[in-house]
Image (cartoon, helix red, strand yellow):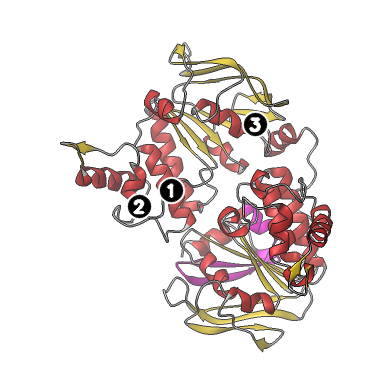
Amino acid sequence: MTTPPPILSLRGIEKSYGPIKVLHGVDLDIGPGEVVALLGENGAGKSTLSNIISGTVQPSAGTMTWLGAPYAPADPRAAMDAGVGMIHQELKLLPKLSIAENIFVGRYPMTAGRIDRRAMEERARAGLKRLGLDVSPERLVEGLSTGRQQLIEIAKALTLNARLLILDEPTAALGGEETQLLFRQIARLKAEGVGIVYISHRLEEIRQIADRIVVMRDGAKVQEFDRGDVPVRAIVEAMVGRALERMFPGLPTPSDTVKLEVRNLTSPAGTFRDISFSVRKGEVFGIAGLMGAGRTELVRAVTGADPIASGAVLLDGRPVTPRTPADAIRNGIVLVPEDRKLQGVVLDHSIAENIGYANLGTIASNGWISKRRLFRFADDYIARFGVKGRGRQKAGELSGGNQQKVVLAKWLARRPEVVVLDEPTRGIDVGARSSIYDLIIGLAREGVAVIVVSSDLEEVLGVSTRIMVMAQGRQAGILDRKDANDVSVMELATL
């Protein structure tokens, strides 16, 4: 059989920002009905290359062809008109518009010069149904979970009838069941001849769906595998340019002393009911479950961010049930939220300011903030946490891994007794993940009680002493490390 010609070809693509070159002569072909995994650490050039293909960024040098003809989209609209769709890792939905309006924004179906709302909502409903999302297209996006918003972004792309889809971390906010729904859609699109560029830090996913793997490092294509079922170690070593040692550090033995206890906690909205567990000093307690199981809502309630209908939170045996985040922080309980860009850092403010906001009592003198003291304080924690940035640099200029380190730094500078991390490595490359895991285990070694919520089953298994599994808002069971594996966790998660 002859190989069909590629639908997209890139030759010698380069990109520079002033004197800094971020892409170095990249060649890439994508065939019809082919899933090409584009992998690399944060900063490897994946997003820049994707943005060039989708018309968001213009290359400094090189050429592209689309269906055999020269291709140079001036903007994303031109790329979409040609048949190229992109799902960005960062959600771009408009919260005050309905789901249907978000799916068709900029390309509303029109009848007699007016938006045909019936047609729009019917087409949106069909796209949502394909992804197994049971939600009305008339509902506002505001208030939807991060996972559901991600599925809406995917539904939006499915309505484009694109010949090429670029999926940038499409499963970062999805649980196992939702991920499998997406994979079934990808298989259907492949059968229809759609080419797919798939970017993910979840390497086990790549083995399931990729036909070919392209690895980038420091802005260059460094290796290509002609199949998807490549050992994870080989992929990671190509990404980081060195042999990979162990990913997860050894866990310390926790104390027998209970630091945090949750008793019969129930939410007013019913997102979780009658949850009870305890976390010991020096323990990493994992919380697993599918999307919609109530994990995030639970830890937000424990840390005062969401209301509690009934139940209690105890610290060292004394009731401290928080009604606000300030209550929790005063008692030494802090939350590193799942959406670091929306809830963790102020992107337009400096790294130093972000670290300082949680530590005003330390850096302010008589109610006044000294810039010298602020930067000295921040520089200390930037160095301690290995943040690749300077105090005066905007947080929005950092990679995802470094932003997460800033969030950790600002809270750990307060020396909390309980640290809750919701999706601590979402959208973070394998090298940065390892340093985050070192920080988590380091906290446990210092006697801090740590709670880790993660949709990444390998992650929650790798860092946890015990794992509580949630299903449909209820506590399905708590597993000791020796009894926890992917099968036992998923059995409880699907009860």
Task: Indicate left or right for 323 with 398 as reference.
Answer: left
Give residue 410's quadrant in the image. bottom right
Q: Residue furthest bottom?
A: 318
Mark nearest the camera among 1 and 3 is 1
Q: What's the residue type where badge 2 is placed?
A: Leu
Dot 2, how many residues are within 10 Å of its Cα: few (below 14), some (14-19), or many (20+)? some
What residue does disc 2 label?
A: 97
Q: Determine contact: label 1, label 3, CB under 8 Å.
A: no
Which stretch did the figure color magenta?
458-483
Picture coordinates of residue 243, whole percent (x, y): 80, 36
Judging by the rendered image, the residue that carries numbered circle 1 is 93
Q: Is residue 177 left or right of residue 337?
A: left
Residue 211 shows in this picture: no
First-in-chain label (1 vs 3): 3
Residue drawn where x is 51% and y is 43% of the image: 170
What is the secondary structure assignment of the residue under circle 3? loop
Which label sits on residue 45? Answer: 3
Mark before the other along the chain sequence, 3 or 2: 3
Give the amino acid type for the residue marked by disc 1 in the picture.
Answer: Leu
Residue sitting nearer the eye, 218 or 457 = 218
Q: Label 2, secondary structure: give it.
A: loop
Q: Nearer the viewer, residue 401 or 292?
A: 401
Determine the CA span between mark 1 and mark 3: 25 Å
Instruction: Give the x, y percent position of residue 321.
Output: 59, 83
3D distance between C-alphas at marks 3 and 2 = 33 Å
